[in-house]
Image (tube, grey):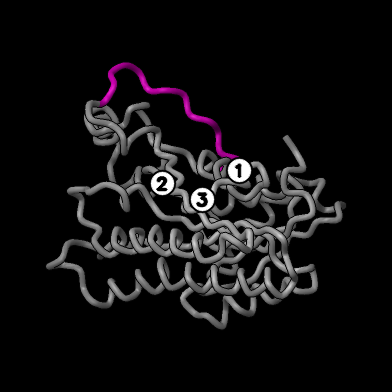
Amino acid sequence: MVNRLANKVAAITGAAGGIGLETTILFVRENASVLMLDISEPALEKALSKVYELCPEAKTSKQFIKTMKCDVSKEADIKNCIESLDLAGGIDIMFNNAGIMHSEDDDAISTSEKIWDLTQAINVKGVWFGCKHAVLSMRRHKKTKGSIINTASMVALVGAATPQLAYTASKGAVLALTRELAMVHARENIRFNSLCPGPLNTPMLQDWLGDDVQKRYRREVHFPMGRFGEAIEQANAVVFLASDESSFVNAADFVVDGGMTKAYVTAEGPATAAPKNNVV
């Protein structure tokens, strides 16, 4: 399917990799113009090359793909990036995706205040800043509809014995923030929804678990489909939430976790086949 996002302008934070990059690729394929935001300029440059490699038609289309360095914990950065889209008619879609889960994030005793504050600054304050300046842009340009998607996590919905206190608390805050803004701005037809991914098949997770532990983890822990999720599966959900197809979806905790948060007993049998990401 194409043209679901035609003539729309989107900004994506954390766009240099993972869910953000996969979403960028799908947005471009759906004919949106995209501003890719990330804190790493080299990573953005590499990501942009990958987008053009996979979407060569974008080079000659009317849509644009731009990159800007952005530290989402700094309001001035977010403000500057979103206002840069004024010449393009303002923003229609904001995907507040940037976030961290720090290696020193632990339990109530071991997590330092420094790690707590850093995590909240990026994962919560950064989302707030993105929402704030997206709404201001939509108002400036008298948009009749808009979609703002905030990346939360399934850990905001269920408890886990693996301690990651600052991260879990931050993602719970994203859910509450998103629901509140969805109510406040509903009559402006600006929709707010949270994406709640399950564990993703990432190099970081693979390194952390190791091959043997991964096999046991998928078999014994609550993975109904027998595998981790892929970034493109999250990106497909974001495309739906960004498009007019989801025009009556508002304040949703949009869970994409293969059923993990609903599992009591894990199904047996071989794992299901996973789709291929655009970026390996």
Q: Earlier in the sequence, mark 1 or mark 3?
A: 3
- Look at the picture and state if 52 lies above or below 118: above
Residue 125 magenta: no
Point out residue 174 in the picture as x, y percentages from the top left corner.
40, 61
What SS does tag 1 mark? helix
Question: Looking at numbered disc 2 in the image, what kind of residue is underneath it?
Answer: Pro
What crowding class fits label 1: few (fewer than 14 Cα within 10 Å), some (14-19), or many (20 or more)? some
Mark 1 near mark 3, Cβ–Cβ under 8 Å?
no
Q: Quadrant of residue 270?
A: top left
Q: For the N terminus, which image quadrant? A: top right
What's the mark number on residue 203? 2
Question: Looking at numbered disc 3 in the image, what kind of residue is underneath it?
Answer: Gly
Which segment did they paint magenta? Answer: 266-280
Point out residue 18 in the picture as x, y percentages from the top left corner.
51, 50
Q: Is residue 5 left or right of residue 106?
A: right
The Cα atoms of the two marked residues, 1 and 3, are separated by 18 Å
What's the mark number on residue 18? 3
Q: Can you identify the residue that label 1 sits on? A: 240
Point out residue 260 in the picture as x, y percentages from the top left corner.
33, 35
Q: For the C terminus, which image quadrant? A: top right
What crowding class fits label 2: few (fewer than 14 Cα within 10 Å), some (14-19), or many (20 or more)? few
The Cα atoms of the two marked residues, 1 and 2, are separated by 27 Å
- Look at the picture and state if 84 lies above or below 195: below
The Cα atoms of the two marked residues, 3 and 2, are separated by 10 Å
Point out residue 120 in the picture as x, y percentages from the top left corner.
35, 71
Q: Total marks drawn?
A: 3
Q: Nearer the viewer, mark 3 or mark 2?
A: 3
Mark 1 near mark 2, Cβ–Cβ under 8 Å?
no
Residue 274 magenta: yes
